[in-house]
Each structure stands twice: as structure tokens, then as C-alpha cells.
Image: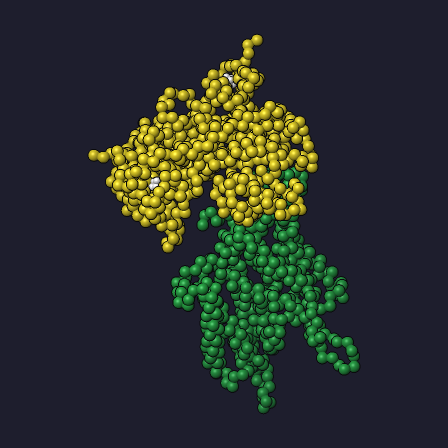
Chain colours: A yellow, B green
Amino acid sequence: MSSALLEVSGLKTWLGRVDQPLRAVDGIGFTIQRGETFALLGESGCGKSMTALSLLGLNPLPVSRIVDGEVKLAGLDLLQLSEAEMQAIRGRRIAMIFQEPQSSLNPVLSVGEQISECLNLHFDLDAKASQQRVIELLESVGIPDPLQRIKEYPHQLSGGMKQRVMIAMALAGEPELLIADEPTTALDVTIQAQILELLKTIQRDTGMAILLISHDLAVVAQMADHVAVMYAGQIVETASRQQFFEQHQHPYTDKLFQALPSEQKRDQRLTVIKGSVPVLTQDFKACRFVERCDHAWDLCRTTPPLWTEDNDHGVRCHLFNQDADVERTMLPQTQYSSPLSEVLPAERNVLTVQNLKVHFPIRKGVLQRVVGQVRAVDGVSLSLKHAETVALVGESGCGKTTVGKGILQLVPVTDGDVEFHGHRLNGLPERALKQHRSSLQIVFQDPYSSMNPRMTISQIIEEGLSRKQFTKDSEAKEKRINELLERVGLRAEIKHRYPHEFSGGQRQRICIARALAAEPEIIICDEPTSALDVSVQAQILNLLREIQHEFGLSYLFITHNIAVVNYLAHRVAVMYLGRIVEQGSRDDVLHTPKHPYTQALLAAVPELDLNTTEEVTRLEGELPSPAKPPKGCHFHQRCPQAMPKCLESYPEHTQLSTSHEVRCFLYEESE
Amino acid sequence: MPFLPVLLWTDILIYLLLSVVVASVFYVRRRPHLIAPWKFVFQKKRGVISVMILLCYVAIGVMDSVHFRLALPSDEKSKTQHYSTEVLTVLDVLVMPLRQQLEKTYSSPFATRLFMREMQQSESGTVTFDYAKLKYAGAHLDNEQDKTADIQNTVIKSTISALFIWFVAVIVVMFWWAKKHEINWKQVVNKFRLGQSSYPVRTCFLMLLVLLVFFFNLIALSASYHVLGTDKVGQDVLYQALKSVRTGLVIGTLTTLVMLPFALFMGIAAGYFKGWIDDLIQYIYTTLNSIPGVLLIAAAVLMLQVYMNNNPDSFATIAERADMRLLFLCIILGLTSWTGLCRILRGETLKLRESDYVLAARALGAGGLTILHRHILPNLMHIVMIAIVLDFSGLVLAEAVLSYVGVGVDPSMSSWGNMINSARLEMARDPIVWWSLTAAFISMFTLVLAANLFADVVRDAFDPRMQASV
Ligand SMILES: Nc1ncnc2c1ncn2[C@@H]1O[C@H](COP(=O)(O)OP(=O)(O)OP(=O)(O)O)[C@@H](O)[C@H]1O
Ligand code: SF4
Ligand code: SF4
Ligand SMILES: [Mg+2]
């Protein structure tokens, strides 16, 4: 009678050498009911994707092998099937979409061809019927003008469009189960909201089950009916959504929630999970979380906890095992939050940016003639006070990074002024610029590409130092490097190693140490945590706040993560297509957003709160190209409140209060 | 002094190259990220096999690069010591019999008589028209019928001694291994036998065995026979093939050495400075690329030839003259082939200069030169490495073609191209003289095959994209 669609039990996928396997997936079991959304939550490297691939028998060969387990799709054990039989299942009964829409579409086939290929694999349709079905599918995933689109190639589509096409391809086989591996991680919040909405609608219409793989608690909160948390190759907790968000039990789950930045935690350090994920090549004789758990006691160190399930809420922890030492569960849960007073910015401006413009010429033809301009930044004015954090938010491609690079003079500035302590930086020759260079530093988004792989950590940090007083004195130099590494929470011994030996979070610390080495006043943080897991993000955010206290640094914090902004920022500037559309104190902008774009952006952010059922207006469409900005207000094509005059000219600044200004005709003072 | 060392230009460059290689080995050993790809190369069976074959060639080539002139027997009166005009190498001395045992004309491999009949007078005075006995090959035989038995005998003997040497070598290595890792005998034997090492030790031993057997047999047989026959003037073809090795190696390596500075400098300059420098350099290499390379080479070589004919006094020996031409050929080949690498380096530099770590370095105030030599150059080295090994076999083949056409190395210099060139007439004879061509073919083919295998492995090891897919 059970309506279980997929039952997985004891699934083990191991990688690498036979005598010393890497247990990427080590005994996973869960059940997905028909028509429900089941979320698999976990940090990077815990085995989520490998699980998904193993279900379909797509795990990479020959490096990995499924050593044990059962995967039953409505009673049929998939692991026993031959490759040919599996092919009939893939795409038809179980379909999958991936994180990177970019690389999952074939660039030389048109959209229509790719979708009809999927159709022809599973159905016997003639050309006309197939074309008809392709159009239906494209319509169902919300692609406007499908008749036109089927002739287009992937490079002509934006990221969100590609993900929609991917979904259309997955839907082509009318699957019973859709596996979505981080389907929105590569997308903007506004696009993410559209895609999640789309998945929900499709599920409602077709009754398909979804296995959603994600690292984002908020996305899970929005989508899932059931949640499973994975840690180090095992599931440590499963629960229904309600239970999961209200009474999660496992210490790891608890930590994940605490590590999330939010407004309420502004005056405290974020909880971090100490240590790191254990090496998966060992034969575990203890709880896998024991090194990092605050509740661990002797039993945890000698016996791996068993799976206990009570009222559909399963957990793998001795604390909840009735037979174990019950007294332990009574211990009060110690709160590890240390207060952190807010830095109060001084009234002194360190950096003033006036009407900054950065245009990139578009060249074409043999003679490389300039045929147009990409107006990446088109008149941005900003100021940054001493010890202040200003957050710059906006969709991908709106020019945030370019603002940062323009301030640092790393790209040629077309027009405007960048003044640092009253000295105009743009237009200075490189030689004169040098004396200001070290005062303005940058920390990049991708910790993997921001360090030269051929240099040791000590050489990397030394780069920041060498232009200072340390040129001669190598002992003092060593001492300073050690100090810096310890300041960012790394051991000094690591300095002779190379970047590839470190994890993302550690690399980001090294980058911060490099920036600190130059003794800057301003650090431009270009999405420094967006490539990191929540628990690691918490460490980096803590570090950034501590050093702001200690050195009185000013941050220009570029991000698209509103929760981080809420936790960290003093002021917020919202950017849309090369211009700042709203700017003000954090409170003003995030609580009483005025610009329709800000409102939509905030509405698109998934909420952890389970009870937000109110219908919000979703932002339609995508960011226009900065090479051809629309006439009038750049936002008018997507704005729900657009008026006739919005099509004609760009609105001027409107000062709403001393700390809040906006560019929108809705607030223009009438004559 | 019993000999006068002669330093040819190519010798100097070869020594330079060798010292660079040795120095970089020491440099690389201390840097884990640089040594990792090399470990990968030696963990592959293909890598080990090709390296061992290449080492044999390099050994022959290096021995053939130590040039000197022997002292002439001095007469008592004059004080000055005179030296022979003939330039010899260590290799020549080692294979002296091969060099000196000239027959009269063609003889096929393992023959004891000439390939052609000729008039000869026996001791009794009768004149016969027959295949004459060779002067050296098989001279030790009492009866020509014993030849097969004699060859068999030699093969068996030298194979057994090769096996013995191999066995000793294996034991020594195992002993050293046991000492180093402090494990006992049994474990080492087991480890090697089962192939439980991260390096393909078994393949290495097997290859060593093959090489030992091959060389022992070759040496033993060539002592009393012309293993690959003799050519028109009766010279041993094996000797020619051995002498050609150096020419091939020189062309394959020095050419890259010559073009490397160009390609690196131009490629990096174009990619890093962009603007008009980039335009200029792109213009230069597109133009160069559209002129057929053979045309340039032919023109240059012919001009050099004219110069040499007009100034015969500038060269003390024929060898020096031939060497000059070889070097010149390397340079001109290098000049026509730097464009490909230059283009790749330009593209990569364009990418690197926008990378986050270069931006970070600029934000820290690093100047252009610092960025170039600390951030860009080291990250281009893997491309250079790949290009060098990929180009090598192409250049060896190019030499053969150019010499065949007559614009290659000096005709007096042994090279595979020259051997093929002379084989042109031999192939037209009836009965056909096939061994010169075969010898050139086999020795060149083995080298090129080994080099290609090696290039393959090196590319896998150094190319980050390949790594991801492995
Ligand atoms: N060097 C360049 N040459 C030409 N166009 C560029 C260049 N750098 C950026 N652009 C364009 O400028 C626009 C703004 O880019 P930018 O990187 O500043 O966006 P962003 O807001 O940082 O986006 P993301 O959130 O994805 O990092 C984009 O359309 C981009 O394609
Ligand atoms: S079993 Fe012990 S160590 Fe593991 S999570 Fe539970 S309390 Fe912590
Ligand atoms: S100016 Fe008009 S189009 Fe632009 S945001 Fe305001 S209302 Fe919308
Ligand atoms: Mg960016």
C-alpha cells in the first residue's frame, strides 16, 4: 500500500584504491514518496552528488564503484539492472538536472534539437508531433516565444533560460522522479526564485517527485517536504520539514542553523563548527562528528552511533539513542555565542567615488574598430567612512566587481573621480599610484584562482610586505608573516606549503592575510564567502568583523547574499545595470525598501521562516545587456509599477531622508 | 698531449642544454608542485618505456658530441705537435672497428661476401668472376658454412651474459630498496613481483632486460659481421645509423632552444602589453606563417652554402664546416617554427594577466616586471614543456625531409635524411639494396615513436585539463 517511489538502503559508493577506499557514500538510506520533494542537505564534499549519480548508475567509472546497497524504484532494484536496461530508466522514469546549465547543454545543437533528441529516445513520435511536444515543453517551463527559441543555440540564452531548457529536457521523458543537483546555485536570487517557483508548479501539475540536492537551508525550507542531512558520507538526520526546522536534533544540524548569519546575530560572533570534515579513507570507529561536536563524550569516541528513528524523525547520534547513557541528554546545551559590539563608523570619509564610469569598448572586424561600449559601470557615486562596511548588492553582471576594480584602478576608468583621503586616484600614473596601492586591498570571490599556484604561502604574503620597511630585515619579515598567519587563524608552520594543499576556507584566510600584510585602510571584499560552505562562511565573516574592530578597516562588501548584508553592513547600495538605484542605511534599505527593484530583490530571497505563505510578486525577466541598456529607467521592462514617463528618461536622485536616497519616479518630489 | 679537444658550436649548445637540464632537475626536486607532474610521468608504463629508450639515444648522442683530434706521430726534429685533420668523437673510438673496417662496396647484412660479382685473381693465378669474400666480416670463420652456427653461438652467449648482468642489477636495486625502506628481502621481492609500487617497477625491469639483451647481441654480432650491411663505399651502415643519432637529436632539441626565447618573449609581450605591441607581434607571426617554411629554409641554406664555398679558410676541418651548417639549419628551422608556440603563449598570457592573483599583486603595488617573472612566467612553463616535447619528433622528421630534398645538413655529415637520400639510387638497383633505407627507417622510427609516447605522457601530466579528466 505504501506509496514509496524510491527506496534507497545501505547504498555505498567508494572511490579510489581497493585497499584504501575513499568512502564517499557510506551506507545511505532514505525513502521518497510519490509527488513529494525530498531534500538532501549537506556541505561540499559530503557526498551529495555522488549519491545522486549512484542512483542512476552514472557514478564515474572506473574510479568509483557501488559496493553495496539497494535502490528500489517502485520495487525494481536499479542496481541489478544491466546498462541497457538502465538507459531505458534514465530520462524516462528518473531524470536529472545539474548545477551548471552552461556545461550541461551541447553547444552545437539547437535547443529544439536537444529536446527532441530526449523525446525520441523514449517515445515513438513523428517529426510533427515531436515538434509540437517540444513547443509544449518549452511553454511549460515558461520560455516566452518558444517557436522562435527552438532554433536558438545555448550560447544565445542566459543562465536562467538554459536552466529552464535543462528542465524542459528533463521533463521530456515525463519522469516520475526528478533529481535536481543544486539547480539554482549558479543563478541569481531573482532567477533562483523563478526556477524554484517553476519546479513547484511542475510538481503540482505532474505529480512528479523531486530529489533536491542543496547546501542552502533557505532553499530547502521553501521547497522540501522531507529533509535529510548528510555529513561525511552518511545521513545524520531525516525529518519532515516542520520537524526539521522546529525541532532538529542532531548537533551538526543545530550548528548549521547557528552558523547562518542574520540580523538578529549582529552583535555576536557567528557560531562556527570547529575542526574540519574527517578524512573519509579511515575505517570509522567513532562518531564521524566527534571531533567537532560540543556534546561528545566517551561513548561517542568508541562506538559509531546507530540510526534511531522515532515518529518519522530519524537521527544518528548517541544523544537520542534510548539505550545509551540517558543522563547525557539532560545536560544543558551550552551557548557558544560571544558578544561583539558593533563598530561605529567615524564621520570621516575615507573614500569618495563620484560619478564613476567604466566602459569597455566592443571591438569588431579586422581593424578592431570600436563599435560600441559595454557600460559596465555608468555613473556610480559612493562614499565609505572610516571603519564602515558598505554592502553593494545586485544581480550578476550588474557591474559590482567592476566598481571594485575601478576603485582600485585595476581597470581603466572612463570618467568620474575616485578620491582616497582627498587624493584623486584615477588618472594618476602607475608610479604615483604606488604609494596609495597598499592602502586599498581586495579579497576575491574564488579562493582557488586568487593565489599563484607556484608560490608558497610565505612568498604570497611576502608580496604585500616587501615594499615596506621589511626589504632588508628577513628575520622581522618572517616574524610578521607568522603574526599575520596566526592572526587569520592559521598555524605559522604552514607557510612553506603551496596553495593547492589548502581548503577553500583556509585559502580565503590566506588571501585576507595577504591583504592585511599591506596594512590597508580599505578592503574591497568581492563576494568573499559565496564559494564557501555555511560553516566556513561563518568563520570568514567572524574574522572579517574581528579585524575590522582591531584595525579600523573600511569594507566595500560586494555580495548578493542578503543575510550576510544584514549581519555585517552599516549601509547598503543596490545596483542595477551599472547604476546605484537605492542607497541608505541597512535599516532603511532592507526594512523599508523603496525602489521596486530592491523590493523585488528582497522578496526573491528565500526565507528560513516556514510561515511565509503570502504571495510575493516575482521579478520577471532578466538583467538586460549593459551594451544596450534600455531607454529611460533601466528597470522599466521588469518593473511592475512602470509609468509612461519611465520609458523616456532616467530618474534623478531623490533624497528620502538624510541617509536614504533612491532613483525612481515614484518618489520624485512633485513640483 | 695525445689529442686536441675540439669544441664545435653545437657541442657547446648541447653542453649548455645538458647543464640546464641537470640544474632544473635539482631545482625541481625541492618543489613539490613542480615534481608532481614528473612523478606522474614516471608512474606511467608508457613514460618509463619511452624515457629508457630516449636515454639510450641521448647516451649515444652525448658520446658523439665529445670531439677531439688525435695527435699525429711526431717526428723528432720539429718541436710542434701536429694533429690529424680528422675530428673524432668518443663514440668513434668506442666503435673503432665499425669505423675502420671498410669493405670494398655493398654487402648485405650478415653477409660474408660482397653483394656484387667482380673479377678476382686467386692465388693460383686463375681469374674468376664471382662474389668476393669480405675483408672483415666473417673473417674469423674457417668455413663459411659455419656462419649460422657461429651467429647462434654468439647470440646465446651474449644473451646469457645479458641475463646475468640484468640479474645482478635487479638484485642490487632490491637490496638498495630494502635498505632504504628497512624492510626485509621477502617483502621487497613480493612487492616488486606483485607490482605493488606506485611506479611500474616490473615494466622498468623488463625494459632493462630487453635493452640489455639487444645491446649485448648487437655489440657481439657487430664485432664480426656487418649487422646492417655496408654501403656503396663499403662503410658499415650500423655505424652511419649510430652517427645519425646525434644529428637528429641536435636538430630536435637545439631548434627548440633557439626558438624558445623568441616565442616566450614575443608571446608574453603581446599578451601582457596588448595594444600596438600585440598588433605588431600578431602581424609578424601571421606574415611569417603565410610564407612556406621550406622556401625560407631553402633560400637561407643555399645562401650559406655559397658563403662557405667562397670562404673555405674559415673552417679548419670538414667537421667544423658541417657543424656550422647544422647549427644554421637549427636556427633557420627555429625561426620558422616559433609562431605556433608564440600564439599559444600569447593567449595564455592574456588569460593570466586578468587572473585574480595578478590583480591582487597589482593591488599590492607590484610592478610589471615583478608580475611577469613571478606570476606569469612560472605559470606558462608547463605549456613550454609540452611544446618542447611535442615539437621534438616533428623536427627530427623535418630534418630527414629537408636533407632528402638537399637543403638539410651537410652531405658529409651522417644523418637519416642523407641516408635516405643515398638510398634513392640504391632502391633503383636490381637486385635492390634495401638495408640503408631500412636502417635509417628503424633507427628514426624508434626515436620518433619513443618521443611521441613521451610527449603524450608529458602532456597528460602537465596539462591541467587532462588532469581533470584522468
Ligand atoms: N574586461 C571586460 N571587458 C568587457 N566587458 C566586461 C569586462 N569586465 C566586465 N565586463 C562586463 O561588464 C558587466 C559587469 O560585469 P561585473 O563583473 O562588474 O558584474 P558583477 O556585478 O560583478 O557580476 P557577478 O555577480 O557575476 O560577479 C558585465 O556585462 C560584463 O560582461
Ligand atoms: S554521537 Fe556524540 S559526537 Fe556524534 S553527534 Fe552525537 S553527541 Fe556528537
Ligand atoms: S522609475 Fe519607473 S520603471 Fe524605474 S523603477 Fe521607478 S517606477 Fe519602475
Ligand atoms: Mg563579480
The image shows residue A395 at horizontal and vertical percentages of 50, 28
Q: How many marks?
A: 0
A217 relative to A587 in the view: left or right:
left
Can you name the residue that lies furthest to the top here?
A671
Determine the residue positioned at 54% across, 28% down.
A343
A277 relative to A306 in the view: left or right:
right
Using the image, determine if residue A416 lies above or below residue A22: above
Determine the residue positioned at 69% across, 69% down.
B5
The image shows residue B261 at horizontal and vertical percentages of 65, 51
Q: Decide which of B283, A165 is in the foreground and name it.
A: A165
Can you name the residue that lies furthest to the left here?
A1
Determine the residue positioned at 49% across, 45% down.
A502
The image shows residue B143 at horizontal and vertical percentages of 50, 85
Q: Decide which of A111, B53 is in the foreground and name it.
A: B53
Using the image, determine if residue B444 lies above or below residue A613: below
Q: Is residue B19 visible?
A: yes
Determine the residue positioned at 26% across, 35% down.
A310
* Quarter where residue A366 is shown: top right
Dividing the image into 4 quarters, which one contains the N terminus of chain B?
A: bottom right
The image shows residue B274 at horizontal and vertical percentages of 64, 39
Q: Is residue A55 visible?
A: no
* Quarter where residue B97 is shown: bottom right
Q: Decide which of B281, A65 is in the foreground and name it.
A: A65
